[in-house]
Image (cartoon, coloured by chain):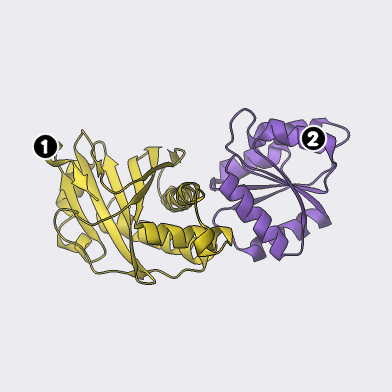
Amino acid sequence: MSATPSLLSTLRSATEEVFDTMLALPLQLAPPVPGHLDVAAHVAAAVAFAGHRRGLVVVHSSFAAARQITSRMLGIPLHEVAGEMPDAMGEIANMVAGTFRNRLAAVEPASDVSVPMITVGTDFSIVYPAPVFRARCPFDMQGEPLSVELILTGNEVGSLQQAAGASAMHACGSEGDTPDRAGVRC
Amino acid sequence: MRFLVVDDSSTMRRIIINTLNRLGYTDCQEAGNGREGLDAMAANPVDVVITDWNMPEMNGLEFARAVRANDATKTVPILMVSTNAAESDIVAALKAGVSNYVVKPFTPTTIKDKIEAVMRA
């Protein structure tokens, strides 16, 4: 399960399961996004994990997608969605990361997950000071863009960067970040 | 049937209560952690408790043990809803007094089946 495509495939299927089960919102896998990540997102809900693997799962979405998710999740009309959105996105990230963790734990030692952290805004960057491996699964959610990013740190970063070539791009956009280019605009 | 939903996430409480309402269960109280859950049960008896695991102040396992230690509440079925899916986690929950376990994400059918299972037990 150390191969990058397997990790990304696991993350992708975990995301699809959460959206299908909790929201009845089928996701379409969007075309891969090669190179540096530069996609507009206004909501980033992150859950860290540590243990056998260390890193983050981050759900990126537009405001519109986040509002739609909140509406479906809480059963409230779209126009009534207000302050509930960050918590709802945090819960989605928690379930995606938890499902991802649970699936990996079936084939390798388990990792623990953190409480979710949610960033909402129109102009922000997410920066990692250490060498990290980043890979992103872009989706189309009924016309709205949404992506789920996997960020790994630790000893496996180098091997993941090597493995992240063309094979990983079949499933998702991916790249390795070095300390001097760890900042990625999302 | 009277339900108590215990979760520190107001979003998750709302999701679970919405699910219960859709299943026809409309008598639902809520609490933000185990301590508040015990207070709620002391004030208003309930027939089924649905609780999260990870909560501040008093987590779901501590809450389940406290419910089982109280003569007035020791037979109330407890359903735990959590993203923790490891077998060791589920065993720990059952040992603490949890009656049945639901791994998130869940469908309304799963909740319905688990409620019926704990009520039959």
When asked about the image quadrant of residue A145, the answer is bottom left
Query: Which residue is depicted at the point 57% across and 49% down?
Result: B11
* Residue A178, position as x, y percentages in the image: 14, 40
Q: How many marks?
A: 2
* Residue A22, position as x, y percentages in the image: 53, 61
When asked about the image quadrant of residue B55, the answer is top right
Task: Check disc 1 and report its element: helix, strand or loop.
Answer: helix
Colour assignment, chain A: yellow
Tell me: A85 left or right of B52: left
Q: Is residue A119 visible?
A: yes
Looking at the rendered image, the quarter that the N terminus of chain B falls into is bottom right
* Res B68 label: 2
Judged by depth in the image, the label closer to the viewer, 1 or 2, is 1
Tell me: B116 left or right of B16: right
Q: Give, as a three-letter code, the residue at label 2.
A: Arg
Mark 2 surroundings within 10 Å by alpha-carbon count, few (fewer than 14), some (14 through 19), many (20 or more): some
Task: Check disc 2 and report its element: helix, strand or loop.
Answer: helix
Q: Give, as a three-letter code, the residue at label 1.
A: Asp
Chain identifier of the residue bearing label 2 in the image: B
Q: CA distance from mark 1 to mark 2?
A: 55 Å
| Residue with the mark numbered 1 | A180
Query: Which residue is depicted at the point 15% across and 53% down?
Result: A36
Q: Is residue A10 visible?
A: no
Chain identifier of the residue bearing label 1 in the image: A
Colour assignment, chain B: purple
Same chain for labels 1 and 2? Say yes or no: no
In the image, residue B111 above or below residue A155: below
